[in-house]
Amino acid sequence: MNSTDTNEHKVIITGIGGQGIVFLTRLLSQTALRLGQGVVVSETHGMSQRGGSVISHLKINGSDAPLIQRGSADVMIAMESGEAMQNLDFMRRGGSVFVNSAEGLRESLAAHLERLNIRVLNYPATAIAVELGSPAAANIVMAGFVAAFSVLDLPYESMVQTLEQISKKGSEKNLQALEAGFQSRRKMLADPQDALENSG
Amino acid sequence: MCSMSELPMTSQLITGNEAIALGMVEQGCRMVTAYPGTPSSEILAGVIKYKKRLNRDVYTEWSVNEKVAFEVALAASWTGLRSAVAMKQVGLNVASDPLFSAAYTGVKGGFVIIPADDPGPHSSQTEQDSRLLALTAKVPVFDPSTPAEAREMIRDAFELSERFKIPVIVRPTTRLCHAVSPNEVDESAPDEKIPSVKFQKDPVHWTATPKLRFKLHVELNQKLSDIAAEFSNSKYNETIYAESGGGIGIIASGVAYQTARQALTELGVRVPMLKIGTPFPLPSSLIENFCASVETVIVLEEPDVCIELQIADRKQVRGRLDGAVPNAGELTPEVMFSVLHKIFTEAGVQVNAAPEDGELSALIKTLSLPVRRPRLCPGCSHRSAFYAMKRTFGPRAIYPGDIGCYTLGTNLRAVDTFVDMGASITMANGFFQANRLANDERVIMATIGDSTFLHSGIPPLINAVHTGARFVLLILDNHTTAMTGFQPTAANDYLADGSEAPRKVSIPDLVRACGVGYLKVTDPYEQEDFADILKEAQAHAQSPNGGVAVVIADRPCVLYDKEPILENPLPVIITEECDGCRFCTEAFECPALVLRADGSRVDIDYSICVDCGQCIDACHKGFIVPKIAEMVG
């Protein structure tokens, strides 16, 4: 089943324990709920959170089963390139992978991914968060960047409202991080030479 | 709080554990007890959250272990109040003694037990199925397939429990506990008055002698047969009719039901389904009617066989018992798809191919990506304790371990065994006696955490002292139950809801009271002193009047209380001379020590380093040095 022709979105959000995967997932899922969409999320808890791989499955307007079947995710948001590669088999043909990385995925993958029509967008969210003076907010910078694309139908303005609602502290810094991510896309569009989009 | 809470009725994203908690609070449950364990740990925290938000009077506690939790809540039920107890599945083993007894005695106020199962397993020592324990103990079970259904089942479980005066289990699994979905929360609902109840003496039930127990057993069997009849009309057991492809029908329960439905969509087929929400006592007439309507029945359930086992005539049944479904492990979407794909194809039904054809997963394998196994956190004091222990007693010593974050000491080869809560001490005890018979004089050094020691360590310690075992017991006291999210222990000065504890229990006093002749409390960050004390403890254990020697490694969890490190930071650098020998990355295994991709040297990942300085001793060549020394130099 391909979910391109419905308003269903299957999203894999992944990284390493400590990178704020759970918060990033909450930001996206709460925004979808705010927009009246159906939401089912599966989170990682317990031992794996101790420095291990962390993965969230987010289904917007999807089935009640908690997990996404490999080969059917529309979008992946990876806070680390190793975890992005480890979970590539979740992607459907024509899906989009957002990776927090300047270098991107291994070169040996490029030809395969192009053939499968899987688009990879490398974006240095951590570097931008460090520039902003809030290195821990790389997950939110990433969310802002994703919001600049239409892949999830989660508009930036709604994400801002959610962030204001769910940030316990440092909401100002979080909003700055979200905006920085969102503006990056605009800057890229202004510069057609930008090679951030590898394919598709 | 956020503006949403001002609205009386709101749709909120909450976890399955929170949905269960919400169900308890809104159904007038007045006592919830628990011992933390993944995947159940957030249930009690949820009860505390909702009792505050809904302004309900509910007594909550993190009990010292699951048996204690069970019995405390049972007493509340015997007064007539609604009560509940939550734990992970192996916790129900600890509480199985009162479980079996309470099935016979019965209850008064609604009494609901939540054992969270862990198909996989993801964070447990077994994949045991609490539904099978319920079957053995003769207690009815609800098996929810979504968080919203779990919340509804809590309501009906209380009602059933009160009507039949029987304990009732609601059994969630990991994926349900950790699923997040919208739930309507009505924060304006008024608190009904706490029912005016009084414990009434009832010797026929509360102190039943064996003769009466026989009668209670007969009564229990009658209750179960009445409940089975009721369950055949339960809305949780639903037949979903469809044209059957290949004469196939599916019986499924819990999360497996939802995963099966998703797989059928991916396969592009529809078949009749019987969703079972009450696997015990099984409504057999529903099962028989369903089986009669199709040629082949596939039973899909987790983690083991409960429904399939109860179907007497299994000629037409495919499942975990005949190997059509793997006989262990989680029914992930991929496993579910491939099981159904095979059965349908064999029956000549045309189905879609798997969305992932294996190309990408094969490609990923060729990348030889690093496996990120869970590790102790940067700055974790357990690492320092393990490192000193290993340097002092070497690889020949026997290191019985226990259940907690520090089980990860197995990465450092500082944990040689773990069985269940408290077994480090009993295993050390048994190794000592066995080794004595076999003339094996190796050092035995057991490790156990503070919460685990309080949970199940004290009777083993008394046993070891009294029978003259000789070993060193290292209690890794990080002042909290770290692995499951920092729940307080009896040694903390606060309670589950954050209020002040009337008294805290002293671990050193408990150790002394067990008759231990050697006890030292020390900071594992002082590695030299710590190693000297370990040697002294070992010498005591072997001395003529020796026995069990106890060392308490006293330092708070770095995630729970950063103060001691923040007050004395010791930033380090790795000098140019580092040759990438990997000693530090393997023997010390701090996530902040990172070997370069080309293997040439180790760098410090300052984004996660906490400046504890503990790795200075982890380079025997002296290439990890304090930053200050470098600056002064």
Image (cartoon, coloured by chain):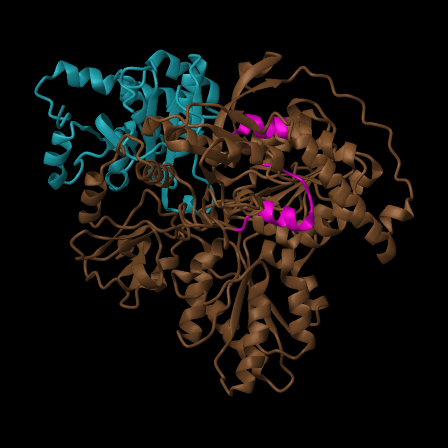
User: Between residues B153 and B614, which one lies in front from this camera angle?
Assistant: B153
Would you say residue B368 is visible in this rendering?
Answer: yes
The stretch of residues the image draws in magenta is B128-153
The N terminus of chain A sits in image quarter = top left
The image position of residue B135, as x and y in percent, is 64, 47
The image position of residue B12, as x and y in percent, is 53, 20
**Which chain, by letter, is cyan?**
A
**Which chain, by letter, is brown?**
B
The image position of residue B181, as x and y in percent, is 49, 25
Extreme residue toward the left, this view: A193
User: Between residues B301 and B126, which one lies in front from this camera angle?
Assistant: B301
Would you say residue B64 is visible in this rendering?
Answer: no
Quick check: is B514 in the magenta stretch? no
Relative to B438, residue B388 above or below? above
Relative to A179, residue B73 above or below? below
Instruction: Judge left or right: residue B488 versus residue A118.
Output: right
The C terminus of chain A sits in image quarter = top left
User: Between residues B292 and B189, which one lies in front from this camera angle?
Assistant: B292
Instruction: Judge left or right: residue B344 versus residue A38.
Output: left
The image position of residue A86, as x and y in percent, is 26, 42
Relative to B177, residue B369 above or below? below
Instruction: Judge left or right: residue A183 versus residue B77.
Output: left
Q: Which residue is drawn at 83% across and 27% down?
A: B195
